């Protein structure tokens, strides 16, 4: 049995992975390791407004999966001209 030690408060540097624009608003996709878990978020470039969690625990799937997810996300943003995480799954 292996124990996993979590270190509360351990937050890695936020890394910009992509940018896109929706209706004149620029948005940034960031990757960041929080307590050992990689998280991908969609944030307003100006820092004001809602941020969205796109995915977490990406470290398990590798860089190719990360790049594919970002590519698909940007494609959806361009296709629908809105933030993909803000779309209803029923659309």
Image (tube, rainbow, N blue to C red):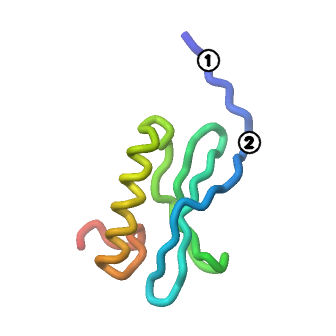
Image disc number at residue 38? none
Q: How many marks?
A: 2
Q: Who is closer to the viewer here, 3 or 42?
A: 42
Residue 8 position in % (x across, y down): 74, 39
Q: Which residue is mark 1?
A: 3
Q: Who is closer to the viewer here, 11 or 70?
A: 70
Q: Residue at x 37, y 74 (%)?
A: 77
Q: Residue at x 42, y 38 (%)?
A: 61
Left or right, 69 with respect to 21, comes to left
Q: Which residue is mark 2?
A: 10
> In 3D space, how far apart are the residues under numbered discs 1 and 2 (Cα atoms)?
18 Å
Q: Who is closer to the viewer here, 89 or 56?
A: 56
Residue 35 position in % (x across, y down): 66, 40
Q: Secondary structure at mark 1?
A: loop
Quadrant of the image occupied by residue 73: bottom left
Residue farthest left in this picture: 91
Q: Residue at x 54, y 75 (%)?
A: 27
Quadrant (top left, top right, bottom left, bottom right) of the N terminus: top right
């Amino acid at each position: 049995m292996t124990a996993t030690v979590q270190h509360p408060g351990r937050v890695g540097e936020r890394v910009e992975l992509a940018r896109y624009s929706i209706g004149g608003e620029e948005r940034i996709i960031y990757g960041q390791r929080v307590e050992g878990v990689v998280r991908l978020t969609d944030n307003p470039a100006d820092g004001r407004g809602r941020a969205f969690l796109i995915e977490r625990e990406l470290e398990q799937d590798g860089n190719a999966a990360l790049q594919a997810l970002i590519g698909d996300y940007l494609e959806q943003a361009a296709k629908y001209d809105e933030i993909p995480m803000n779309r209803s799954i029923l659309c």
